[in-house]
Amino acid sequence: MRTPEEAWSYGLFIPHDPRAVGVVRATIRSVLKAARLTCIADTAELLVSELATNAYHHTTTDTYISMEWEPEPPDLRVAVWDTAPGLPRPRAVGPDDEGGRGLALVKSCADDWGVDRYPNGKAVWFTMAAKPQPAE
């Protein structure tokens, strides 16, 4: 595994299966632990889980997850690529609503987020700044 002082990237295709979101959570946690970036692992895991769940609910196709680390400035960028039409937007939800809070979480917890359109879909992404932890 490269050290956090070097740029790295990982990609993961996940099938249209509700169990795949758990694989995404475990994968990002493992990657960030190996990169000594556990300081952002909990939040990154939550946010990618929300975006992967949205992709599952709004598409019937596989989804691609990308994770990229840039050391200068120290920045993690995670993107969830899917084929769903339309652009997602955070929405107001009532206290009894069982869903609909995912993008609001992304908006409030990430340093930045957005949506990039592509001919066959979109990528919803977020960034988080972090300082690598010293080696154990």
Image: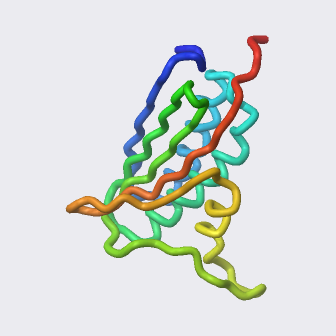
Q: How is the model colour-coded?
A: rainbow
* On screen, residue 92 above or below 124: below
Residue 116 appears in the figure? yes
Residue visible at 41% across and 39% down in the picture: 12
Foreground residue, 22 or 11? Answer: 11
Residue visible at 20% across and 62% down in the picture: 119
Foreground residue, 111 or 49? Answer: 111
Q: Position of residue 42 (x, y in %)?
A: 73, 44
Residue visible at 62% across and 22% down in the picture: 35
* On screen, residue 14 above or below 97: above
Foreground residue, 84 or 92? Answer: 92
* On screen, residue 3 above or below 104: above
Residue visible at 65% across and 39% down in the picture: 129
Q: Position of residue 57 (x, y in %)?
A: 46, 70
Q: Which image quarter: residue 44?
A: top right
Residue farthest toward the left in the current orientation of the protein = 119
* On screen, residue 29 above or below 60: above
